[in-house]
Image (tube, rainbow, N blue to C red):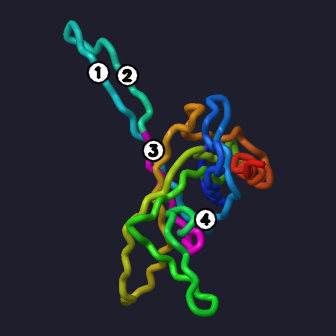
Amino acid sequence: MAKYGAKYLRWAPFAEETPDESSQDFPKYGSAISLGKLVKVTDAPAFNEGKLYGDDELAEYVSEFKECPVDVEVTELSNATASAIFGAKLATGTGSEKDLEFSGEDNAPYGGLAFFICKIVNNKKLYQGVYYPKLKASMQGEEYATKGDGITLTGGKAKFTASTAANGKWRVKSDDLTTAAAAQAWVDAKLTAAT
C-alpha cells in the first residue's frame, strides 16, 4: 500500500445537549464546517506505560492510550474557521470587515474531525476515511517573515488534542472505499449534525 493525497477536511462542534454520554455511540455534533484546503494532518498518539520486573526480566507491561496530538495544516485558516475551532471572538468591524479577537477568556469547544486519503493497493486506486471523534483545538504560534530572494508560501495551522470519546474510541479508519464520493459520504456521515 502507498498513501498519497488527503482532502475534504471537516470539523464539527459537539452538539449543545448531551453530546458525548453514551458508551455505545459516537458523539453527537452540530453543523460541520470545512477547515480549508487540506495540506497535511499529522497525529502522534501518546500512551501511559508501566513496567514491572521480576526474576531479572520484564514480568508485566501495560500500555494505555493517553491522548493524541493532531497537527493540521491548511492552505488558509480563515477568521471564521479560527473563531469556530479556537473559541475566539469574531467581531464586526466597519462595512464587511470582521476582526478576529483573541482573549484570555477564549474557550475552544470540543468537536470531531474527519477527512479522507487516497492510496494505491495492488495498482488499484482506493480511498480511506479518517475520523477523530473527540478533540479540542489549542492555539499554535505563528511566524511572519519578510519577502526575500525567493517566495515561500505558507498556510494556516491548528493543533488539536484528541482524547477518547465516551465509547472509548479516539480514532476510526474506514474500510477501503472505491470512490472519492463514497469516502466523502463516509466523512459526512461521521460528522452528521444531531437532530
- Magenta residues span 67-82
Type of amino acid at the residue the image marks with label 2: Val
Q: Which residue is mark 1?
A: 51
Q: CA distance from mark 2 to mark 3?
A: 18 Å
The reply to whether dot 1 and dot 3 touch (C-beta < 8 Å) is: no
Q: Secondary structure under badge 1?
A: strand
- Disc number placed over residue 35 in the picture, else none: 4
The reply to whether dot 1 and dot 2 touch (C-beta < 8 Å) is: yes
Q: CA distance from mark 1 to mark 3?
A: 22 Å
Tell which circle, 1 or 3, labels the residue nearer the N-terminal end: 1
The reply to whether dot 4 and dot 1 touch (C-beta < 8 Å) is: no
Q: Which residue is mark 3?
A: 68
Residue density around tag 4, few if under 14, some if 14–19, many if 20 or more, within 10 Å: many
Residue density around tag 1, few if under 14, some if 14–19, many if 20 or more, within 10 Å: few
Q: CA distance from mark 2 to mark 4?
A: 37 Å
- Report x, y in % for residue 175: 70, 38
As displayed, is residue 186 above or below residue 146? above
Front one among 119 and 9: 9
- Report x, y in % for residue 70: 48, 52
Q: CA distance from mark 1 to mark 2?
A: 7 Å
- Disc number placed over residue 62 in the picture, else none: 2
Quarter assignment of residue 106? bottom left
Q: CA distance from mark 3 to mark 4?
A: 19 Å
Front one among 156 and 90: 90
Q: Is residue 84 visible?
A: yes
Tell which circle, 3 or 4, labels the residue nearer the N-terminal end: 4
Q: Secondary structure under badge 3?
A: strand
> Residue drawn 61% across and 40% down?
20
